Image: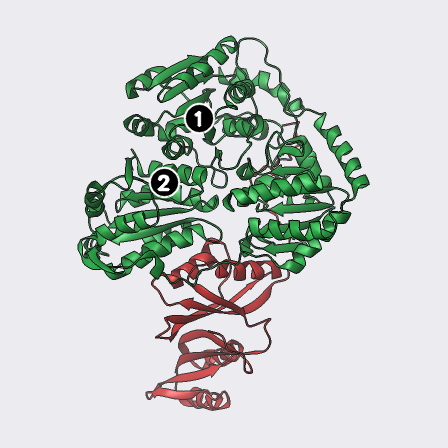
Chain colours: A red, B green
Amino acid sequence: MAALKIKKGATSHSAYDLRSHFSDVIERHTLAVIVENEPGVLARVIGLFSGRGYNIESLTVAEIDHEGHRSRITIVTSGTPQVIVQIKAQLGRIVPVHEVHDLTVEGASVERELALLKVRGQGDHRVEALRLADIFRASVVDSTLESFVFEITGTPEKIDAFADLMRPLGLQEVARTGVAALARGEVAHG
Amino acid sequence: MTRQMTGAKMVVQALIDQGVEVVFGYPGGAVLPIYDEIFQQNHIKHVLVRHEQGAVHAAEGYARSTGKPGVALVTSGPGATNAVTGLTDALMDSIPLVVLTGQVPTFMIGSDAFQEADTVGITRPCTKHNWLVKDTDKLAPTLHEAFHIATSGRPGPVLIDIPKDIQFANGTYADKAKRRSHYSPQVKGDIETIQELARAMETAKRPIFYTGGGVINSGPGASQLLRELVEATGFPITSTLMGLGCYPASGDKWLGMLGMHGTYEANLAMHDCDLMINVGARFDDRITGRVDAFSPKSKKAHIDIDASSINKVIRVDMPILGDVAHVLEDLLKVWKANGRKTDKDGLSKWWKKIEGWRAEDCLGFEQTGPVIRPQHAISRLEALTKDHDRYITTEVGQHQMWAAQYMGFEAPNRWMTSGGLGTMGYGVPASIGVQMAHPDALVINVAGEASWMMNMQEMGTAMQYRLPVKQFILNNERLGMVRQWQELLHGERYSSSWSEALPDFVKLAEAFGAKGIKVDDAADLDEAIAEMIAYDGPVILDCLVEKHENCFPMIPSGKGHNEMLLANAKTQGAITATGAVLV
């Protein structure tokens, strides 16, 4: 239409403004979410992330207080600063969510992940895998004449590094728990 | 006091204890025990709708016109899935609802039983919260908690899924007072930010109040405080579609609605202001237009009870998390205590500028000849009904925007329209819900013929319960808003946007037992409207209007507020060509 001067192929006549209007620096944040341990609460949190298009890099959940019906969900997510603020606000308005803590901005925190890795090999490869496991303080939790299962705990980056080293040595299978995190010092949540 | 009773009886008892008067619903296998209990009491009235979507919209109409939570009761499976549109509508517009669904017995859940659906799974993203109750002892506390959550903080719909064996089983009924909830959203705003806003109001040269549905949801006290604040400061005020009525349309500070089809003066004032005070609105995309061109020169304050609404779309300088009434009360107190100061000189220049925009008369139109222009039809409806105790519902589309533009709302809770979700088919059932709550009022559903037919089966409900709802249909034999966009934005290719094989609405009315009136000449319009008002019973008024009328002013999507199209824009020329395409 001449009156609107809409260029061919333009999306400006969409019902929505499709452009991003905030800072586009992507940050990685670790959130600790204390929730009422009731059916469906994890689905609410996951549904929020998928429904609003937020990222989940890692998510762990387990009951932390049986009497008090409390579970703790640790979520590693990434987004622009505005998206991170939105994620926290959206989590906060889920009815069974009691507390939302951004461990990345609320002072120092420790993050740990556990992984099991199955490595299959013979001869030098097998020796080298064992030697590297020792350097990474991974322990052998199962062994056959041709395979090991290593257990390793550390930051996600450390586990990535260990898995990368194991790949040429016969890495077959990896199981990771996702990140668990706590604030350092005396501050306690939940 | 605790008492033993069946789950079904608990449902009815909890509704009575919560002060519920009306339930809109539709029975089915999985809710029969509850219907049996409803049959054996006289406290709660049940309204049998014709479709579960209608039940939820009727409950919305009831809720919005009373400020009380609406209640709907439907069966499992299709009953629950049919309720989904209504739930989503209520979530988007923050309407407090308690929806009860039946479910197959607990021991059959997951077996793909007859009329089984994963109701809590399906409705999780379209409710504020929901529950599947698997223990009769937990039913009463859950029911009470449901009312608390639906009505506290930002209101919204909640759903309780009740398996049939839970309804039959005996359990302990817990009183309302026993409720313990951790859910208690903050209502008082941060006083330091309120003080900052009060100081900004003292020095602002071009301030504006931008108000929304949050004012209405906060209760009549919020509207009262807002009026006091507007009168005391002399600042101009505009409102979203959802907030119409929170400030009287007859007030001299009123600029009309803003947004995509808002007035020229409201949108330009939003664009040029230096202080924007957002009271209970959420910077919806229909309001902001192009976000990076939205009110570039202003400091922005945002009062909202939902933290996730703040800084979601537009960065604000003064975020105030709290209930509108509480915050406005503090704001008034602080501003008065500081000496009721405003920049009188700046304000008077600002008003001069606004008067200049007003002089554009963006809603002006001329009715010439016999073909009724839809703007004229709404204007006459407004003139002939404004002195009545009147409630207006609408469907969704051009007629909805014309109603918002040409009708004036003097009080909150008088205007029920589907804003966020834009649900065609909302108006007929909503008008029924409103009329149930206000049996003696004049309840009019302003509709387009296409939207109206989406839930027209509810005319049966209106007849059964003798609800004299007036269905005012602007009939252009088109999906008018779709047609408008196709004309303006899709090269006049009118893909599936006209209504063929329309029913004879007068005969349709008569088939239902209602009164039907048809008008197609401007000279007969007033008489037809008067006849509609005078008739003691449901009426369908089929008002044939100009088929190719477009709704202006209009901010095309992706454009800024200062790039509005007015009615006399070049687009008007295209309408002549339109005829050839369609005929």
Mark 2: few, some, or many residues within 10 Å (few <14, many ≥20)? many
Q: Secondary structure at mark 1?
A: strand
User: Percent from the top left, x then y, of residue B422?
Assistant: 47, 37
Which residue is outermost to the right?
B345
Q: Position of residue B292 (x, y in %)?
A: 67, 46
Question: Distance from label 1 to label 2 (Cα)?
Answer: 19 Å
Provide the secondary structure element on which disc 2 rests: helix
- When the figure is inspected, residue B276 is found, relative to residue A2, above or below; the finding is below
Residues tagged by mark 1 and mark 2 found on one chain of the structure? yes
Task: Give the mark nearer the N terminus: 1 vs 2.
Answer: 2
Q: Is residue B274 in view?
A: yes
**Chain ID, mark 1:** B
Left or right: where does residue B110 sit relative to residue B188?
A: left
**Residue drawn at the location 28% of the way across and 38% of the way down:** B46
Instruction: Read off the residue under disc 2.
Output: B56
Disc 1 target residue: B444
Residue B378 lies left or right of residue B41; in this view the side is right
Q: Quadrant of residue B274?
A: top right
Res B520 seen here: no
Q: In which quadrant will I find the N terminus of chain B?
A: bottom left
* Quadrant hosting residue B29: top left
| Rendered view: B289 above or below B109 | above
**At which x and y percent is residue B303?**
60, 51
Tell which of B548 and B211 is nearer to you: B211
Q: Are marks 1 and 2 in contact (CB under 8 Å)?
A: no
Amino acid at pointer 1: Ile
Q: In which chain is the residue bearing label 2?
A: B
Q: Amino acid at mark 2?
A: Val
x 53%, y 20%: residue: B374
Q: Nearer the viewer, residue B281 or B348?
A: B348
Residue B570 position in % (x across, y down): 67, 23
Residue at left 41%, top 23%? B470
